[in-house]
Amino acid sequence: MKTNAASWTIVGQGLAGTCLAWALWRRGVAFTLVDSGVGGSSRIAAGMVNPLTGKNFEPSWRIGEFLPEALEFYAGVEAMIHRKIWHPFPVLRLASSKKEWTKILSKFESPEVAPWVKGIVPCPPSWAGAVEVRGGGRVDTRAFLDGSRDFFERAGHFQVGCVSQESFKSNEIRCEGASGLMTGRYGAARCAKGEILTIRSDHWDAGHIRIGAGGWLVPQGGGIFKVGSTYEWSELDKKPTEKARIRIEEIAHRLGGELYEVTDQEAEVRPILRRSQPLIGPLGDSGWMLNGLGSKGTLYAPGMARRLSDWLVDGTEPEPEVDIRVFLKQSTHDESHGD
Ligand SMILES: Cc1cc2nc3c(=O)[nH]c(=O)nc-3n(C[C@H](O)[C@H](O)[C@H](O)COP(=O)(O)OP(=O)(O)OC[C@H]3O[C@@H](n4cnc5c(N)ncnc54)[C@H](O)[C@@H]3O)c2cc1C
């Protein structure tokens, strides 16, 4: 399938829309990037890339392909906007209990896990074990979004505006994040509200991303850290809550230490269709989409945007695994067999 719009409208300037704008710009394709300015989850994200994730210490989905492409992409944008976007950091994964540590150790020999493990490191007091993971880091999402927006605005490719979520045009590419998924257009979404604290401390370790106790801490430079996060599946608003603040402060105590000051608390909704495995493709006569970046937009947005631009420009279809048409067909099949 190939399309020939005279000019595309990219709806949404989060990580998805911004990466797609760069992909189209590189191919010399005409487009306008439109954003309502109400913000989205890319604006509050910690920007962390962590190769081995979750309780089970497993590699992120297809990280061996997506991470090198993402790093090359961010380096290319840095050169265009003259702002630093990618900050590599070693990741310190801490285990709270002997059971968790035993599980982590059991993964060391796995051929998917081993390349990312740098080695066991001395364990800080009150933890059961510590391992250093290589390949991680932080994308400065604000620098990336603001610098890209300035660049495209100067080039006449950016507009502020709210595009209707009720009527669609065939030249629109929807990169609307959670607000687009919550219209129900892509079937049952599983979006999750997440809250995050900005913390100032001159006493914390600013040389590592720290993961443990069900959360993470990401140094932002200048004694500032982002600490998170929570997952709330039913109340999908953007209001910071006392409950989340208490939970994230517990994480902050465990991972950072006692001496700190909370300077901000923010809440947003992660766009989730199928865990953190995004989808792209055509919506019949209603344009195209890139959405469902989940909790890992920094890692997957560049590779998904490149796939979508190859599809739009050359007609090269991506692997069925990331094709929204396959996903929607599968969801309908699952629903009709749900009882
Ligand atoms: C607390 C928290 C922490 C996170 N931390 C990380 C992290 O450390 N690392 C990581 O990789 N990911 C993280 N994420 C996930 C990450 O934020 C998402 O994967 C990513 O930001 C999704 O990008 P997006 O472009 O799809 O959506 P969004 O960032 O939400 O962007 C959508 C944009 O579209 C605009 N828009 C929507 N509808 C319209 C319309 N009709 N017309 C015009 N404009 C419109 C919105 O204004 C918005 O700017 C975190 C998320 C949360 C909530």
Image (spheres, grey):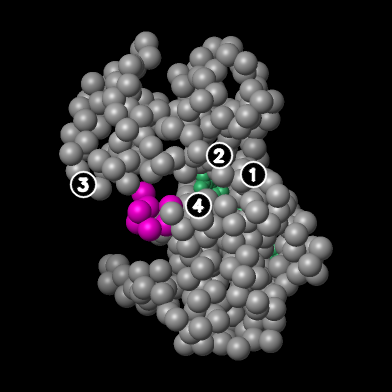
Sequence order check, earlier mark of 1 and 4:
4
The region drawn magenta spans 60-67
Q: Identify which residue, 323 or 190, lies in the foreground.
A: 323
- Amino acid type at circle 1 is Lys
Kindly identify which residue carries mark 3: 111
Sequence order check, earlier mark of 1 and 3:
1
Q: Quadrant of the C terminus?
A: bottom left
Q: Secondary structure at mark 2?
A: strand
Q: Identify which residue, 126 or 202, lies in the foreground.
A: 202
Query: How much space separates mark 3 and mark 4, taking CA atoms?
Result: 22 Å
Judge whether residue 219 is colored magenta.
Answer: no
Q: Which mark is residue 71?
A: 4
The yes-or-no answer for disc 3 within 8 Å of ligand 1 is no
Number of other residues with Cα within 10 Å of mark 2, as a class: few under 14, some 14 to 19, many 20 or more = some
Query: How much space separates mark 2 and mark 4, taking CA atoms?
Result: 10 Å
The yes-or-no answer for disc 1 within 8 Å of ligand 1 is no
Q: Are marks 2 and 1 in contact (CB under 8 Å)?
A: yes
- Amino acid type at circle 3 is Pro
- Amino acid type at circle 2 is His
Kindly identify which residue carries mark 2: 87
29 relative to 62 in the view: left or right: right
Kindly identify which residue carries mark 1: 84
Q: Residue at x 36, y 29 (%)?
A: 132
- Amino acid type at circle 4 is Leu
Eyeballing the image, is 187 above or below 85?
Answer: below
